[in-house]
Structures are given as structure tokens and as C-alpha cells.
Amino acid sequence: MITSPPLPPGLVAHRLADRLDLVDEVHRLGAEVWPEFMRHSAGGGEYYGHLHDTFADCAIVVTDGGGQVVARVLWIPFPFDGWLADEGWDWVIERGIAARRNGTACSAASALEIGIHPNLRGGGLSGILLGHMRAAVAADGHHSLFAPVRPNAKHTHPHDDMATYLRRLRPDGLPGDPWLRVHVRAGGQVVAPCNRSMTIGGTVQEWAEWTEADLAAPGNHEVPLALAPVTSDGIRAVYIEPNVWVRHPLG
């Protein structure tokens, strides 16, 4: 049996299904933890729009001593047939939503997000919350937790393809990327890059509003916190984010 590691003093974890009164705060936290452009994917919009009524049983919210939401942990069950798509995050959301809508049995779950308020970052809470997700998914009867992991230092090497980035290892053999390292230390196994994990498109004006970046010139542009260049034709710009599939065996 996988048990949840203890939270720091003053923090309490709840299944969102038991605290639907916190849904609005859970959504507001997204603006605190993700770059604005990351909140405009089509798949993400469909998922988050049904978080409260369809997937509240697959979410953990963490509150502080004042009852404020300071972290959210989200996953989605999906039917796993031995194959993981290059479309990663977008693909598993589509697959999980269809399964829930059609009543299809799910043999695995995929992590979607561990979002932590900036004031609580850097103290090891992300690894603790990954442990809570692993325990919850195991308790729900799944034997594997997959994750299209967004390496949190990849934006410092935007022109590396993901396979090249994964070869950046520490002398002890662990991934050089901090968030991948948390997954591996927790028992996760790096499977492969998912190079088209999330696709976000918009006009160059929308990108300017999201990022303050000027994408009016056609070509590839570096955008702060993007893991790869954003491609513009001068009218519209598209960002295709690479992630990394990681598998956590749960027994």
C-alpha cells in the first residue's frame, strides 16, 4: 500500500469532491502558478471547465491555516492499452474525458498538474504532493500513474529538442532537470519524450497580451517560460510544447 507523506504543519489536504466550496479558489490558483499563455490550450479549457462536476474525485486541494487554497493536485483516469501518444497532455485529457463521458473502464491514470502557490515553492512540497497523488491513484485501484511531465528548467534551453535535454544528467545519474528529478526519486521511470504534448495557438495580438512578446515578424521566437520557440506567420502564432512521459508503477 502506498501511503501519503505528511504535509508541513498547518497544511491540510482534501479531495475536491469533499470541498466543492473551494472550486472558485482552485481555479483562481491557476493564475498564480502558470504563465498566462499556458491557460489557453483547447484541451485544458475543456478539462478545467468540468473539473467541479466531472473530475472532482480526481483532485486534491491543499489549504493553509487560514483555509486558503495554496496547492492543487490533478489527475485523470484513462484507458491505457500499452501505447502513449506523442500528443501527451492534450491526448490524455481527450482520452480521459471520452472515457468518463462514455463510462469506459480505465486501467491507469495520468497526472495533469501539481500547482503550488509561489510563496510555498522551494521547500520540497512538490515531492510531497506527488506522493499524495501516487497514494490517491493507487487507492482508486490503478496500478500505474503516468505523467506528461513539464520539465521546469527546460525553458532555459528552448532550442534543445527534448531528447537532447534529457541527456543533461547530474554526475550521480539523476536528471539535471529539478522536476524530472523529483519524479525519478519518487520511483518514476522516464519513458520517452512526448514532443507535441500541448498545442496553444492565438493571434499575435493575443500572444502580446499573454506574454508581452512581439511575434509580428514571421519566424521562431523565444518567449519567456516557453519550453520551445513559438512559431509565427505574422498573423497567428503557435506553440507546441514538448513534455516527457514518466511512468510510476504503483504495485
Image: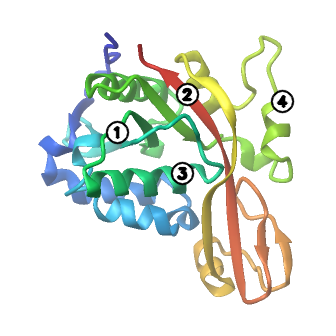
226 sits to left or right of 129:
right
CA gap between label 4 and label 3 equals 22 Å
**Is residue 115 placed above or below 224 in the rendered structure?**
above
How many C-alpha atoms fall within 10 Å of the one at disc 1: few (<14), some, or many (≥20)?
Answer: some
Residue at disc 2, secondary structure: strand
Q: Kindly report which numbered mark, 2 or 1, lies closer to the viewer in this rendering.
A: 1
Residue at disc 3, secondary structure: helix
Image quadrant in which you'd find residue 115? top left
Residue at disc 4, secondary structure: loop
Point 55% across, 62% down: residue: 38
Mark 4 or mark 1, which is nearer the start of the sequence? Answer: 1
Q: Badges 1 and 4: C-beta atoms under 8 Å apart?
A: no
Q: Amino acid at mark 3?
A: Trp
Q: Disc 3 designates what residue? A: 89
* Picture coordinates of residue 184, whole percent (x, y): 61, 20
CA gap between label 1 and label 4 equals 33 Å
111 sits to left or right of 6:
right
Q: Kindly report which numbered mark, 2 or 4, lies closer to the viewer in this rendering.
A: 2
* Picture coordinates of residue 91, whole percent (x, y): 53, 54
Residue at disc 1, secondary structure: loop
Mark 4 or mark 2, which is nearer the start of the sequence? Answer: 4
Q: Disc 2 designates what residue? A: 247
Q: Disc 4 designates what residue? A: 167
CA gap between label 2 and label 4 equals 18 Å
Q: Disc 1 designates what residue? A: 106
* Picture coordinates of residue 92, whole percent (x, y): 48, 49
Q: Badges 2 and 4: C-beta atoms under 8 Å apart?
A: no
Mark 3 or mark 4, which is nearer the start of the sequence? Answer: 3
Point 77% across, 80% down: residue: 215
How many C-alpha atoms fall within 10 Å of the one at disc 2: few (<14), some, or many (≥20)?
Answer: many
Q: Amino acid at mark 2?
A: Arg
Q: Amino acid at mark 4?
A: Arg
